[in-house]
Structure formats: C-alpha cells, structure tokens
C-alpha cells in the first residue's frame, strides 16, 4: 500500500478550498458544470481559472499561467485540457508545488494501446513526484458535508444533501444515475466520487478512505474492475470491524458486460466467479441493478442489523402471503415457524377461519380484531428477529382504513430493537408520502427489491456474527 | 369440458344488465362497494336488492324475497349472505330460473374440512342444475367495455378504462393490486375477474373465454392452482394459435408459498417444477412479481413480436452498456455481433476512440455526430430483430439534450417493423411523461423489469415460430 494515498492525504484532497482550473474557458461545458455544481453545493472557497487568453471568466479573475498562480495557496488543480498537453500541465503543477490533481480529460487507457502508454507515463511521473491524481476520464467528486463540489457532469437530478451514504463510481454517467436514485430515496450523501481510469487514486483507495470517514455509514459503488484485491481484502475487513456495509454493483457477470467494462475505463475485468466468491468471503454485498443498490443502501441506512436470521411477515392478503413466501425462498430468507405462545395468542385474536402461520394472513377482517396485538405478538416471538408488516398509504384526510393498520406497528417502533419494516402494496401518493414522513417511519414499496435488500441486511448481520464468533 | 361454461355462456354471465343482490342491506360494505364500482364504470342496467326487512336501500326499490323478483328479467344474482344460508339461497334462485350466480360470501373450502364439504355439496347442486356460479370467496368482476361492474372490493386505485389487457385473479386483494399496477401503466382493461374458490367456474374456464374474447389481446393472471391441466393445455394451444399471450403469476414456488395458497383459497397447489415445465411446453409466460406482470403486459401491449432473437442496444454510457449486457445474459437475451456493414457505418459516424459493439456505447460526445444515423444503422442491421435505444426525459420546455436523443429514433418508429424500445435511465417527471405521450412513444424505465419483460416477448415470438415451423 502506498502511503501517499493514505486516508489522511485523501481527506485533504476531498476538502479543497482554493481550486485552480486548467483549461478553463468561457465556453467550456465542463468548467460551466463545475461552477454550477459548486454554487448549488454552497461552496465558500475560491476558483482560480488559468487561461493565457482571458482576464476574467464567468466573473472570476483569471491567471495567464500556472506559474502566475499565488504561491502555497492552491490545494487542488482541476485539469480539463486536451489529452496531448496533460503531461506538460501536470509537470508545471508539480513545479508550482501543487500535488493534488483532478484530471477530467479523457483520451487515455480507454482509447486503446497508445492511450494506455500515455497513461502509464503519467502514472509513473505522479508516483515519482508524490502527486495524488484522480482520473483521467472521470467527472470529479462532490463532498456535501464540506460543501465542496468539483464535478464536471450535470446529470445528477436533485440537490445533494449531506448524509451517511457514500457513492464511488468508476463510470461517470452511471454513477450520476446511482446518486440520483439514492437522493430520490431521501437518503443523504457523505461523498460522491468518480474515479475513471484510476491512473493513481483507485476505487480501493477511496473505499479505504470512506471506511475511516466519520460521515459515512454505508458505502456503495459502481465498479468495472478492482485492481488491488489484497488491498480490498484489508479494507473489507476494516469495514466489517466498523460495521460499515460495502454495497457493490459490479458489472462483468457476462462476457459482453466484461467487454463493455474494458472499452469503457480500460478495466481488466477479471474472472467474475472468483470475484463473486471473494465478495462473499470478505462480506461485500453484491447487487445486480442500480435500483437494488439504492434500495439496499436505504434498508441499511434505516433499519438496524437483526440479531438472528428469522423473519416474520404479517399481511391481510392470502395472495401476498404466497408471493412474499416465494420471494423469501428465492432470496434465502428464513421464515421460521411461529412460537407456540404466539400461535395461541393469534388464535385468540383472529377469526376462526384464519390459520396463523408465517407469513401471517390476518385475513380481510382479522385486522379489526386488534391488529396492534397481532403485530406485537410477532415482535415478541422468540423465533423472529425482524418483522415485515403491512402498512397502508392514506388516500387523504380522514382515511378510515390506513390509521388502523399503521397504528398497529407505530407504537412498537420505539419499544423493540428488532427491525420492523412496513411494506405497502398500495400506490404511494404525495399525501401518503408526507404523512409517513411526518409519522417518522420508513417503508418498502416494491416487495421484490425490498425483500432482496432485506436479505442483504440479514445476511450481512449473520456474516458479522460469524466473524465475531 | 363442461358445456355449461362455454365461452358463449360466460359471455352472457359477464354482461348482465339486471342484477339481483341477495343479502343487500344499507350497511353492507360489499353492497356499497358494488354500487360505487358500478357507478364509476358507467353501468346503465339495474340492481334489484333483495331484503325482507327493507323497502328501499340506497334509493333502490327492494324486493322482500327472491320469489317476488320480476320473472324472466334478472340475468345475474350476486349472493353476499352468510355462508350457512348460501345453499338455500341458491336453491331459491334456481327455482326462480336464475342460473347465473356470483357468490361473494366466504366460509367454504378456505376454512378447512367442514367448509370444503359444504362447497362440494354446492358444487354438485350447481352441476346438476346447470348453474354458472363464480366463487365462493371472490370479489366479482369488472367488464369495462360493457360498462358492467359487479365488484365487492374497493381497493383498485384509478378508474378502469377499457383496453386489451385481461386480469384473472384467484385472490381478490392481490388481483386488485395487479389491476391497479396495470392501470398505472396507462393500459386499458378488457375484463377483470376474481374466481376465488372456484366451486364451478374456474380460472381455466375464464382463460378459455378470454382467448376467444374480441376485446382481449393480452391475458394476465394471479394463480394459486390450476385445477384442470388438460383444459389448460387446450386453452394455451388456442391462445398461441391466436397469438394471445398468457402471462401468469403463479405462487407456490416455495413450500411456504404453496401452504399459503392452500389456506387462502383451498387450492391444491401441485408440484411447482412440473407446472413450470408445463408452462414452457405450452407457451405460458410465468412471472415472479406483480411488477414484472404489469411490465410484461405493457411490453406485449405496446411492441409487436420480433421476427428473430437478436437484440441490439444503443446507449451513451459505457457503464450502462455493461449493466444492460449483464441483465441480458441473466434473462437469456442474445446480443449478436453487429454486421460488418453496420460496423463500417458506425466507425464513420463515431469519434475515433469509440469502439462499435453490441451493446453500443456511442460515448458522451458520440451522439452529436448523428444519433439518428446511428440508430438507423442498428435498425437496418440484419443480425438484429429488435432495438433498445436510449431516450431522455426532457427536464422542461427548451431542453437542449432530450430532443437530440429522442428524435434519433422517433422517425424510425413508423418505417420499420422491428420493435424499437426506448429506455431511459433518467428520472421521469410529469412534464416528460406528458411530452412522451404527446409524441406517441412508449418506453421502459427500469432496465431490470424492462429487459426481463422484453425477454418474455422475444421468447414468446420464438415459441410461436417453433410451433409454426
């Protein structure tokens, strides 16, 4: 492991206040995006555009050359010049004493052999000089808690709010979609990083940083290739020790997907089956889609780890019972038999024709007989470590049905350490969303994604227990 | 096969204009629901509530007994009395000459041995007398094209609009969710039927009817058990002959799911693996979730069957290329090598560093070089039978980016018989939804569900070709 990219060094890298921009022009779309994003993030530092042919760009005082920049001030340089002059530019930055570089420009390893040669030369130079360089062929990063954004894309939809979820993407566009979907789930972001071709700073370096980052509680990543499996192993161990889940969408499970990864960021995609085994061994959670990644990040952010593997499910539709049971089997979730005591309680509460089981169908009229007691009985069942229970989005003011169902578990949320996960099969509207937010409870909407994410939570908790035991 | 439930007989059953209601009271929630649904559907027939202790209910003239109902008028009786008097009630209806019965009441086979005995007695009686009986333990049906709704649930969200998708549910609540999700996809419904315990009319009977129904082009169903596999085989054959896809969400792939099905509608859930093989043999499309069912119904409703198995994918994100390729492999979709001619065309159009392949990454700047020509080249490629191509939801008026991308395929929609399926990875807002609707194109939003649904379309087309060949 190289000391120059230690978490401490990266902490400075990710918190610049004085930022030079090489290749800044009034028409450069990347530069425009960088300023727009910084503005939205509430950046209170300063940009120093460098351009030999301008005095001012977008109202910012402009410097003719790198040598004219103030001494000992700039703590990050963004390079968006064309690839042929990147090498010279980085050389001048080093001479000026600027050794934190965000290289947005593309035209390196992703373009083939020649580009790879240029990238190798650049890498060697940066290693020799101790330059921390992110990129080439990346979009930059957004650090919401520090109000820093040096990000050249504009496809993240929604405002970045600070929170516990970190996003690492080797791909720019794809990671913008991931960040958007995470924001859509009302989750906050600790740090959003795109690493591109990773000439120097790799996804592994960023993961290591994030595992130690006090703002981060859940790490997500879109990965085309891991370049340093040994480092990943150490990072994953430390993450497990700190109970920070690492959720990875790794493409390349198909030959076509692998090929796409190679031509995209020049990745050596590796043997997927081996990697899959490695993930399981070190407790990295692998997901298959962006939607599953966002749902899993939400589940880990919102519910504590269960203390065992048993899930109890409560609903009032027999059809849903069957559907949920099939999905649980598909995702390896255990639905234990209910305890004798629970069965007795439920038999006393439910109509005669109801047959208490797990999943539990309280039937279409059963909820009228004390839904609160029913859910409490499940929560108190010693065979169950987590509960999924039906919730109903209210249609509007004065909804009769919704409170009966939702009040059945709300009082229990504060009196148990077991995760209680409300699930709805009704459509959510804005009124219901606001109502649920006001009442302070989270829920899952899509049983397929939700139960798959819950399986990740349950299995991760089990993984940590095995490590301990 | 029993003649009494022939498609012709069922056609009359599903189009009543004069409807008696046994067990109607002012406070009965089921009756209230039936009237509310009929009102919303625009029903122009008449209800005849029967109640010995009322002259009028909800403004409707009420009859003291079945014998007092007008002769030769009532074409359907809805029975919502308690289970203990169902048998007598059906007997009186038969005496009055009313042999179309919708039995909403529960308390039969789903409650155990005794209830099963009562249901068997009822079944035998109906068989002997030629009664077409739907239920017990069902919600009823909605026939949107005929403006008839005899439906005792109220959980379908959104107004039923007439269209080509039929829904059959053995489960009431679950099928209400299915119908809601289908309406949410802006699809219209031809007939929505819940069959419950199926003492007489079975899902197979309804499927047979729907295969011959001129309003229905896609059949969907939530099934806990098929009771007559021989009939299903004949129905599936006829459906294939008419190119009417049958999309089934069949629970019971897990032991727990099977058990839930049994206690729910008294189904004998059968051997799931055998049933799976049967489905493949007869071309029934099996789905795993309600969301997949709705997406598959949408894909079949909106795109014609491709003439071969080769899919081409076009996007401008390398990460998405890998993601889509992995999903295609997972769902068995073939992504053929592009034709030499196509490769030459693409090389001329795309930037130097782009590497034409399938999936095609036109790169972040490639779309500026003639996206229209790029998509046209894929459409004209002889190896490709269907195209998935990126579309961009506009953020609002004057969006620069969105039209460039969307105009790339819009002109092609009318000049090719190959399905062109736009896919977006951006968030949809109301403006974009309206814009896409105005422009008259459909799209898929979720790559996982969308590509899985597309796999069903491609495989179904292949199945039909094998039958022909």
Image: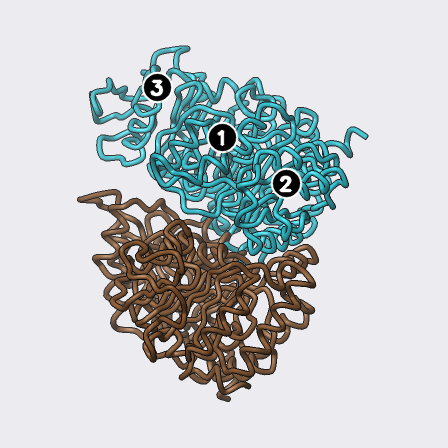
Chain colours: A brown, B cyan
Quadrant showing the N terminus of chain A: bottom right
Q: Earlier in the sequence, mark 1 or mark 3?
A: 3
Q: Is residue A173 above or below residue A79?
A: above
Q: Is residue B212 above or below residue A147?
A: above
Residue at the outermost left position: A398
Q: Earlier in the sequence, mark 2 or mark 3?
A: 3
Asked whether the viewer can see residue A148, the reply is yes
Q: Which residue is mark 1?
A: B441
- Asked whether disc 2 touches disc 3, contact meaning CB atoms under 8 Å apart, the reply is no
Q: Which residue is mark 3?
A: B43
Question: Are the residues flagged by discs 2 and 3 from a single subunit?
Answer: yes
The part of the image, by quadrant, that contains residue A271 is bottom right
Q: Is residue B288 above or below residue B137?
A: below
CA distance separating discs 1 and 2: 26 Å
The residue lying toward the viewer, choosing from B227 and B274, is B274
Disc 2: CA contacts within 10 A as few (<14), some (14-19) or many (>=20): some
Secondary structure under tag 3 reads loop
The residue lying toward the viewer, choosing from B127 and B211, is B211
- Asked whether disc 1 touches disc 2, contact meaning CB atoms under 8 Å apart, the reply is no
Pinpoint the chain carrying mark 2: B
Pinpoint the chain carrying mark 1: B
The residue lying toward the viewer, choosing from A383 and B348, is B348
Question: Are the residues flagged by discs 1 and 2 from a single subunit?
Answer: yes
Q: Earlier in the sequence, mark 1 or mark 2?
A: 2
Residue B148 x %, y %:
40, 21
CA distance separating discs 1 and 3: 32 Å
Residue A8 x %, y %:
40, 84
Q: Which residue is mark 2?
A: B349
């Amino acid at each position: 492991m190289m000391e120059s990219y230690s978490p401490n060094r990266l902490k400075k890298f990710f918190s610049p206040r004085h930022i030079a921009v090489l290749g800044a022009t009034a028409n450069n779309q990347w530069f425009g995006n960088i300023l727009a994003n910084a503005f939205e993030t509430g950046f209170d530092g300063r940009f120093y555009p460098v351009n030999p042919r301008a005095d001012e760009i977008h109202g910012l005082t402009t410097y003719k050359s790198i040598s004219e920049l103030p001494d000992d001030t700039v703590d990050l340089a963004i390079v968006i010049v064309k690839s042929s002059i990147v090498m010279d530019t980085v050389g001048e930055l080093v001479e000026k004493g600027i050794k934190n570089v965000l290289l947005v420009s593309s035209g390196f390893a992703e373009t083939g052999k020649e580009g790879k040669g240029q990238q190798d030369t650049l890498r060697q130079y940066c290693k020799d000089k101790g330059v921390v360089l992110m990129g080439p062929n990346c979009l930059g990063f957004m650090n919401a808690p520090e109000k820093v954004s040096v990000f050249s894309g504009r496809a993240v939809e929604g405002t970045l709010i600070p929170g516990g979820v970190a996003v690492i993407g080797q791909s720019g566009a794809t990671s913008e979609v991931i960040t958007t979907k995470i924001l859509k789930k009302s989750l906050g972001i600790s740090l959003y990083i795109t690493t591109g071709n990773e000439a120097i700073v790799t996804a592994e370096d960023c993961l290591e940083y994030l595992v130690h980052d006090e703002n981060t509680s859940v790490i997500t990543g879109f990965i085309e290739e891991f370049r340093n499996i040994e480092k990943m192993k150490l990072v994953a161990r430390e993450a497990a020790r700190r109970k920070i889940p690492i959720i990875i969408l790794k493409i390349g499970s198909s030959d076509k997907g692998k090929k796409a990864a190679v031509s995209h960021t020049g990745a050596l995609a590796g043997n997927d089956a081996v990697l899959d085994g490695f993930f399981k061994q070190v407790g990295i959670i692998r997901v298959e889609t962006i939607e599953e990644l966002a749902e899993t990040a939400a589940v880990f952010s919102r519910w504590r780890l269960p203390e065992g593997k048993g899930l109890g499910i409560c609903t009032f539709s027999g059809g849903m019972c069957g559907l949920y049971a099939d999905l649980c089997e598909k995702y390896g979730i255990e639905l234990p038999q209910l305890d004798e005591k629970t069965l007795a309680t439920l038999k006393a509460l439910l109509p005669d024709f109801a047959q208490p089981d797990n999943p539990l169908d309280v039937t279409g009229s059963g909820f009228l007989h004390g839904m609160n007691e029913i859910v409490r009985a499940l929560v108190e069942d010693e065979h169950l470590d987590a509960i999924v229970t039906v919730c109903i989005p209210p249609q509007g003011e004065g909804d009769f049905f919704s409170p009966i169902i939702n009040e059945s578990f709300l009082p229990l949320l504060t009196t148990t350490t077991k995760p209680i996960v409300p699930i709805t099969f009704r459509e959510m509207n804005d009124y219901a969303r606001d109502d649920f937010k006001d009442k302070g409870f989270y829920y899952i909407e899509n049983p397929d994604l939700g139960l798959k994410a819950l399986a990740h939570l349950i299995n991760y908790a089990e993984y940590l227990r095995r490590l301990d035991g």
